[in-house]
């Protein structure tokens, strides 16, 4: 796909940030978040209600004006950050906004047969790549217009500043302002996270190194998209229940199913190499939103990273290596249930940081531990992001990852209006393991590979 960048512009807050708000204090959980950009891609068809020839120009003007107004409320996103700093410099330096044109392309053609490897063309920078140093922009935006009038909004939002839930709140409020619904805008809560989880003035160098190495390993990962419809999800929930968890959630059931088949793919790869056997231990991670898990609960509009990783371990039996979905669900449920304010309070001590650093290092350097890193954008309202010309027809992630995050990155996302209550699965992994997964008949009996968005 040929996409040409036509212009770049810096969008600043419509009102200057007051001097007393110039230093935005991050939380301890912000400091612990990956130093990378989260990618978000929204696809909008042509607005047939506006046949005017300057339709696209009006859309882009509206986007930039409303972004400027939104940044006045979410002012840390218009500042600059040092990836290890305790404060964001809210200097109103602004957000880079790129305008691009998809040459000789029609959005409906792309959506009929979505090219996952081409998705990175819609992003303004490298999603999920390690970012280090000073002066990092928390937000970058790219608007790509198709000849048919369709538009794709690609964003990269720095994970050190917000989690996916907070990113969703920002995007939904940007949409409200763009639609002229300022009275419905929810003012972000910019202080609760750092008050509840105060930052440390500095983190030990060994901890920072081990934390980065845990998240960022490897060179290239292929990205694949699969879709589970509501019937498949119901069946998988019925296949993964146990006495202790009689009614698994869709996320728990999907985690168990994906781990079962990805681990079989990893075992197949091992048999072809000089190594043999299954990994002795499977480690499953998934971020957990803590806003409703602390006492008293934090409001949903709490800005920042209010998440922590749940770590679940599953020990395989050499005499019976087949993974039992019900057992995986139980481990995941236990890991989720154990996260609250009290369980995180110990992170505030130097001893705890040293211990956590040693654990992370022992995990990512141990070949007998296979790590599956899950995350989810379910129930975060990304299909509600309406800038004034309708809701997105599709919400995408990104293409192949090169020199990015570690292997086995697995993302759950909502399906669009045509998805009938299904879940999209985005998987990043090594080519040989991905190839096994794509030819796994039992896996494909439930997961449809990269179906059309328009069907």
Image: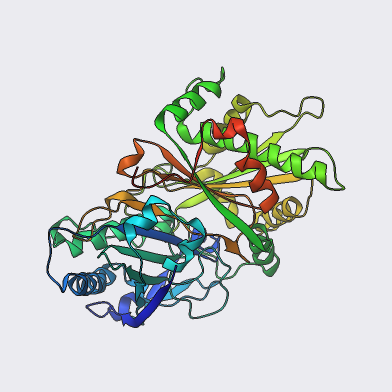
Residue name at image x 45 percent, y 66 percent: 26
* Most foreground residue, 155 or 360: 155
Q: Is residue 280 above or below residue 6?
A: above
The x and y percentages for residue 323 are 68, 29
Dividing the picture into quadrants, the one containing residue 52 is bottom left
The x and y percentages for residue 441 are 61, 32
- Quadrant of the drawing holding the C terminus: top left
Residue name at image x 30 percent, y 42 percent: 417
Q: In this view, does 55 lie to the left or right of 379?
A: left
- Quadrant of the drawing holding the N terminus: bottom left
Q: Does any portion of residue 159 appear in the rendered image?
A: no
* Most foreground residue, 62 or 447: 447
Dividing the picture into quadrants, the one containing residue 154 is bottom left
By what rule are the colours in the image chosen?
rainbow
Q: Is residue 424 left or right of residue 385?
A: right
The x and y percentages for residue 45 are 26, 57
Q: In this view, does 89 lie above or below 265?
A: below
Dividing the picture into quadrants, the one containing residue 317 is top right
* Most foreground residue, 281 or 254: 254
The x and y percentages for residue 204 are 66, 67
């Amino acid at each position: 796909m040929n996409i040409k960048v036509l212009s770049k512009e810096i969008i600043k807050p419509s009102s200057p940030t007051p001097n007393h708000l110039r230093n935005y204090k991050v939380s301890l959980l912000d400091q612990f978040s990956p130093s990378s950009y989260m990618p978000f891609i929204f696809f909008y068809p042509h607005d047939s209600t506006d046949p005017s020839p300057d339709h696209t120009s009006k859309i882009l003007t509206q986007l930039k004006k409303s972004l400027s107004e939104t940044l006045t409320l979410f002012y840390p996103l218009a500042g600059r950050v040092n990836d290890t700093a305790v404060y964001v410099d809210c200097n109103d330096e602004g957000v880079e906004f790129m305008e691009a044109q998809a040459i000789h392309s029609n959005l409906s053609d792309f959506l009929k047969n979505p090219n996952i490897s081409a998705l990175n063309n819609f992003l303004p920078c490298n999603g999920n790549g390690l970012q280090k140093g000073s002066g990092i922009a928390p937000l970058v935006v790219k608007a790509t217009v198709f000849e048919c009038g369709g538009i794709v909004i690609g964003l990269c939002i720095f994970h050190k500043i917000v989690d996916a839930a907070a990113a969703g709140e920002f995007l939904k409020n940007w949409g409200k302002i763009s639609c002229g619904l300022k009275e419905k805008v929810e003012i972000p809560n910019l202080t609760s996270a750092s008050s509840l989880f105060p930052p440390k003035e500095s983190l030990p160098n060994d901890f920072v190194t081990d934390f980065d190495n845990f998240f960022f390993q490897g060179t290239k990962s292929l990205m694949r998209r699969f879709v589970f419809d509501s019937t498949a999800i119901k069946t998988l929930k019925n296949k993964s229940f146990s006495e202790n968890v009689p009614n698994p959630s869709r996320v728990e059931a999907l985690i168990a199913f994906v781990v079962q088949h990805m681990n079989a793919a990893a075992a197949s790869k091992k048999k072809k190499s000089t190594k043999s056997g299954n990994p002795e231990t499977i480690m499953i991670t998934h971020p957990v939103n803590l806003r409703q898990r602390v006492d008293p609960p934090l409001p949903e509009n709490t800005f920042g990273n209010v998440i922590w990783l749940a770590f679940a371990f599953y020990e395989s039996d050499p005499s019976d290596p087949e993974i039992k979905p019900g057992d995986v669900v139980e481990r995941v449920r236990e890991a989720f249930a154990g996260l609250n304010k009290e369980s995180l309070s110990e992170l505030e001590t130097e001893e705890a940081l040293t211990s956590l650093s040693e654990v992370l290092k022992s995990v990512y350097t141990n070949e007998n531990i296979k790590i599956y890193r899950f995350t989810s954008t379910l129930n975060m309202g990304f299909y509600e992001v309406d800038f004034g010309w309708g809701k997105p027809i599709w919400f995408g992630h990104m293409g192949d990852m090169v020199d990015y995050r570690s292997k086995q990155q697995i993302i759950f996302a909502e399906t669009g209006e045509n998805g009938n209550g299904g879940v999209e699965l985005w998987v990043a992994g090594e080519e040989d393991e991905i190839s096994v997964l794509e030819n796994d008949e039992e896996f494909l009996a439930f997961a449809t590979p990269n179906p059309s968005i328009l069907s």
